[in-house]
Image: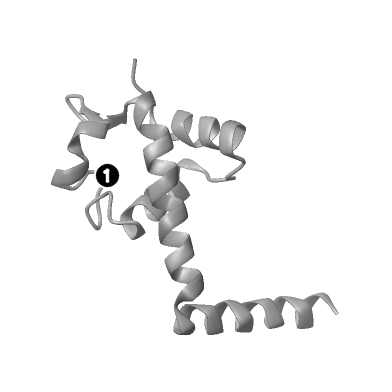
Amino acid sequence: ITLTFSEAATLIRQHWGLSLGSITLRKVLRSAGVLKQGSCEPKRAYEEWFWLTDSSYLIYPHALPLLVRKIDQNQAQARHNPFIQTRLDINGSERELLAG
């Protein structure tokens, strides 16, 4: 059994509460260093988490907790990066100004 990125995103949302669409899941996995930039191809260290069909990569279900852990680690690093935190603060302020 394997999962498409869309199916994986649905299961991640249901089980871990992370609301990600399939496109966002791919972007987050690229940012976390699991997928190669500009593609859905996994980096060599993560190839065993994916199955290559004739035309695309599918995700093994046993890899979902590992992927969620990588996503969480990447988000934790982003929260501790001062540049990214400043951008988050600015974006939050913009939202407050637009809402108010």
- Asked if residue 37 is positioned above or below residue 54 in the image, the reply reads below
Q: Residue shown at 69%/81% (left/top)? A: 94
- Colouring: one colour
Q: Is residue 3 above or below residue 96?
A: above
Q: Residues within 10 Å of mark 1 (few under 14, many from 20)?
A: some
Give the x, y percent position of residue 28: 41, 54
Q: Nearer the viewer, residue 15 or 22?
A: 15
The residue positioned 53% from the left and 45% from the top of the image is 20
Q: Quadrant of the N terminus?
A: top left
Q: Which residue is mark 1?
A: 40
Residue in the foreground of this view, choosing between 58 and 80: 80
Q: Going 53% across and 79% down the picture, which residue do you hit?
A: 85
32 displayed left or right of 71 = left
Number of on-image labels: 1
Asked where in the image residue 88 lies, by quadrant, the reply is bottom right
Q: Quadrant of residue 74?
A: bottom left
| Residue 49 visible somewhere in the drawing | yes
Q: Position of residue 82 (x, y in %)?
A: 48, 84
Q: Residue furthest right?
A: 100
| Mark 1 element type | loop
Find residue 96 and report its horizontal and vertical position in percent: 77, 78
Going by the numbered disc 1, the residue's amino acid type is: Cys
- Is 9 located above or below residue 38 in the figure? above
Is residue 56 visible in this depiction of the protein? no
Residue at 57% from the left image edge and 38% from the top image edge: 16
Quarter of the image for the C terminus: give it: bottom right
